[in-house]
Image (cartoon, rainbow, N blue to C red):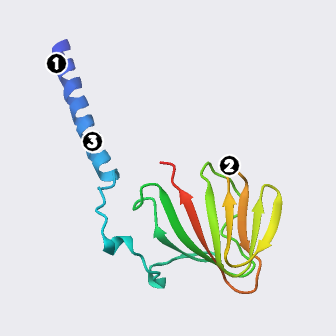
Amino acid sequence: MKPASIIKIAIVTLIVQSAKAQETKKETTPTEIKYSLENCVNHFDLNKATKTKVGYQYWFADKNFTQENTLKMSIVEPGKSTHAPHHHPEEEFFYILEGSASFFLDGKTVIVGPNTSLYCPPNAEHGISNAGKTDLKYLVIKKDLR
């Protein structure tokens, strides 16, 4: 095969690969959201909640809808937690709506009740669990680091 033919094949291959990459990018890039009063108001609907091992969660606003923040409500059964203490680069807020929460932050624990906010600084080890005899209901507010 002549060098010119090899170059032509290589160019065509690069063009095809580039086109496929662009199609993949289009498929994975979210379309631009048009915000309206109807999609900016979100009433809790248990039928749209996601069942978890320890209760359920409901996303009022997720990273695919908002510019950078998420808002989720978690409901955790008595004596359980959504996951073990952990850390991540995003700061996070919890707001206790109902029940009793055990809040762990960097080696210390406190029990709190409704109308209490809890702040987790970036990279701090933290966790929350249900310390009561009824369901724990709380909001999770987090900035999405895209």
* Amino acid at the residue labelled 3: Gln
Labelled disc at residue 5:
1
Camera-near label (2 vs 3) is: 2
Mark 2 or mark 3: which comes first in sequence? 3
Disc 2 versus disc 3: distance between alpha carbons?
35 Å
Mark 1 or mark 2: which comes first in sequence? 1
Labelled disc at residue 22:
3
Q: Secondary structure at mark 2?
A: loop
Q: With 77 as the anchor, is 14 left or right in this view?
A: left
Please identify the quarter of the rendering in which residue 114 is found.
bottom right
Labelled disc at residue 123:
2
Please identify the quarter of the rendering in which residue 61 is found.
bottom left
Disc 1 versus disc 3: distance between alpha carbons?
26 Å
Q: Percent position (x, y) of residue 13?
A: 23, 30
Mark 1 or mark 3: which comes first in sequence? 1
For this orientation, the residue located farthest to the right is 108
- The residue positioned 49% from the left and 58% from the top of the image is 69
Q: Is residue 128 visible?
A: yes
Q: Secondary structure at mark 3?
A: helix
Seen in the picture, residue 24 relative to 62 is either above or below; the reply is above
* Amino acid at the residue labelled 2: Asn
Q: With 125 as the anchor, is 21 left or right in this view?
A: left
